[in-house]
Image: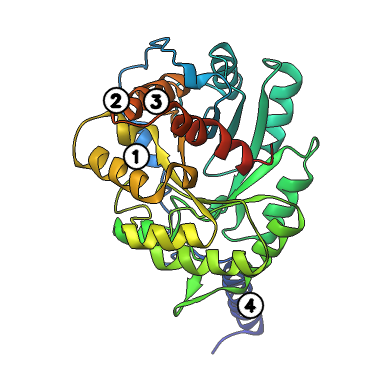
Amino acid sequence: MMTMRTRRFLIGVSCAAVVSTAASFYYGWRPVLAQTSPKAHWEPYKTRNPKPSVDQKLTDPVLTGAIDLHAHHGPDSYDRQWDAFEVVKLAKERGMRGVVLKNHWTETAGLAQLVRKYGAQGIEVFGSVTLDTPVGGVNPMAVRYMADVEGTWGRIVWMPTHDSEHEVNYNKETRAKAIVSRNGKLIPEVFEVLDLIKERNLTLATGHVTPEEVLMIMAEAKKRGITRIIVTHPMLGAQFTNMSLPQMQEAVKLGGAIEITAGTVNGDGPAKTRAIEAIKALGTQNVFVSSDSGLIGTPNHPDALAMAAKALRAAGFSEQDLSRMFKQTPARLVGL
């Protein structure tokens, strides 16, 4: 027979479990309760030993006035080749106009304020937040905080990326995931986040969710009058958002700008061919190029952008086209 103390303990444990589960559903992510030590996306990177990146000191006319909307940096939960101050310094030295600092796990508006205060001067530096599990998934309070950080340099709100339900499921991983929809319908927190993006004049980025979720989110964004929308690298690979050309065309109709990462066009192969064909079909006014750089062993941010500009120029795109993709559209997307 259970003692009164045992009953009270079991009731307390049950209540705690209910509260924990309710909280996880409120914030749009569900921890896998069977795990005693949930595995994070970044853990495998800790055992990798790539060769250090080399600054190739590449230049290109398009770098003057360019803005990189997708710049990874250190410090991070695994090694990055350059910290945020170094990333901005490199961009400034190559004549770039601005950089958006991107971290999958935490907001970077505060870091943008510090770089503006103590780092390279004469360059625009903005922050962002990604709605992965460390910030509570699709958590409206994470957006409020990012928008209110001193300096108010927060600009972009990414829907879940490496912790998205789509990516976790695609990789057959058993770890915490951030959801944006349930049973084919967007969760309430997505609507609240979109309302905040409109209210605070921020930019929406769609993250690594499914193409169908992208279009649902964008349709709701359009209803709210959100005009700055990034369709996050929809041709980078199946574990991310892998959209067909008709889906990308629909996204453009909903007001989206299609992101092409520099690495997609810097090498030869089917990915480059597909990207170039998509740009021609979508129109350069609906596309922009970002570096998505930062990993050790990859080109630094201005090198990656310079290589992409040269590749696109060789594919027949004009200087006006390049200006749209590297300067004008990125500037619009951060409100410049």
Q: Amino acid at mark 2?
A: Ala
Is the C-beta separation of discs 4 and 2 under 8 Å?
Answer: no
> Who comes first in sequence, dot 3 or dot 2?
3
Percent x, y of residue 84:
58, 24
Q: Quadrant of the N terminus?
A: bottom right
Q: Quadrant of residue 198?
A: bottom right
Badge 4 is on which residue? 15
Query: For the residues marked 4 and 1, what is the alpha-carbon distance in whole angstroms?
Result: 35 Å
Label 2 neighbourhood size at 10 Å, few (<14), some (14-19), many (20+)?
few
Q: As rendered, which of 2 and 270 lies closer to the eye?
A: 270
Callout 1 secondary element: helix
Q: Residue furthest bottom?
A: 1
Badge 1 is on which residue? 44
Do we see residue 280 in this rendering?
Answer: yes
- 162 vs 204, left or right, is left
Query: For the residues marked 4 and 3, what is the alpha-carbon distance in whole angstroms?
Result: 57 Å
Q: Nearer the viewer, mark 2 or mark 1?
A: 2
